[in-house]
Image (cartoon, rainbow, N blue to C red):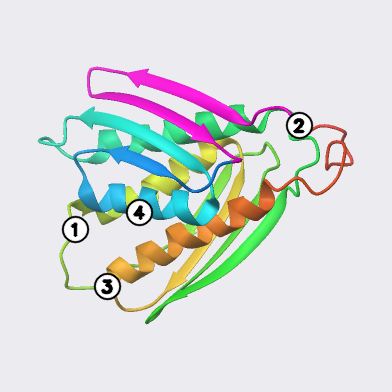
């Protein structure tokens, strides 16, 4: 089987990101971002997907965390799409249900080549607009950016009370679903079209 690895760099006036991804790894991560909560979620994603992830990034977080979170999503999606190659033999579609205390996340993916994201991640009312040091709205935007750049179909539905738990359940659910969807389980392209 060909190596399913990719490296992506992105440098703009707002961010500077270097990312390496190995889909057939051991869940090892080395994440260096100025956003600690977001880094923690990416480490969780790596651990529960068994994807090795090396990520170093900086950005204008003194202005807002939007640019850095979005660009990490774009880079991770680009690397994911590149690492998959022609997708021969992959399981392609998968889902995961992950509980975390009061919260529960349902995540479904289809590595169809058709980018689409529906993310239902409602946050608690009358609480801070951030989870840790990361804006809640940008967590949703990251998931959307990752799916669109990675050219896969993503459906996320989360319920619960604690915002930290809801986000962590979503990241772990995404990890488990992608771990299964990328698993080599057959031969050839898993599509009646003959291409994914």
Residue ID for mark 4: 41
40 vs 181, left or right, is left
The label shown at residue 48 is: none
Residue at mark 3 to residue at mark 1: CA–CA distance: 14 Å
Q: Residue at x 87, y 40 (%)?
A: 187
Residue ID for mark 3: 124
> Which is more N-terminal, label 1 or label 3?
3
Report if the CB atoms under discs 2 and 3 are less than 8 Å apart.
Answer: no
Residue 9 visible within the image? yes
> Which is more N-terminal, label 2 or label 4?
2
Q: From what the image shows, is residue 169 above or below residue 130?
A: below
Magenta residues span 2-24
The secondary structure type at the circle numbered 4 is helix
Q: Based on the picture, tell me whether residue 14 belongs to the magenta stretch.
A: yes
Across the whole image, how many numbered discs are drawn on residues?
A: 4
Mark 3 or mark 1, which is nearer to you?
Answer: 1
Q: Residue at x 50, y 57 (%)?
A: 48
Residue ID for mark 1: 132
The secondary structure type at the circle numbered 3 is loop
Residue at mark 1 to residue at mark 4: CA–CA distance: 11 Å
Residue ID for mark 2: 1
Mark 4 or mark 2, which is nearer to you?
Answer: 2
> Which is more N-terminal, label 4 or label 3?
4
């Amino acid at each position: 089987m060909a190596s399913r690895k990719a490296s992506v760099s992105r440098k703009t006036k707002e961010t500077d990101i270097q990312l390496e991804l190995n889909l057939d790894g051991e869940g090892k991560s080395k994440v260096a971002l100025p956003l600690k909560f977001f880094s923690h979620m990416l480490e969780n994603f790596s651990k529960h997907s068994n994807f090795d992830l090396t990520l170093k990034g900086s950005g204008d977080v003194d202005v807002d965390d939007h640019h850095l979170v979005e660009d990490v999503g774009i880079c991770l999606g680009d690397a994911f799409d590149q690492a998959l190659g022609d997708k021969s033999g992959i399981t392609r579609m998968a889902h995961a249900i992950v509980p975390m205390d009061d919260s529960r996340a349902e995540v479904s993916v289809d590595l169809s080549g058709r980018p689409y994201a529906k993310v239902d991640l409602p946050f608690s009312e009358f609480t801070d607009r951030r989870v840790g040091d990361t804006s809640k709205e940008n967590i949703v935007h990251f998931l959307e950016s990752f799916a669109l750049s990675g050219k896969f179909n993503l459906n996320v539905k989360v319920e619960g009370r604690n915002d930290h738990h809801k986000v962590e359940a979503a990241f772990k659910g995404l990890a488990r679903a992608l771990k299964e969807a990328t698993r080599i389980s057959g031969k050839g392209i898993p599509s009646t079209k003959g291409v994914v």
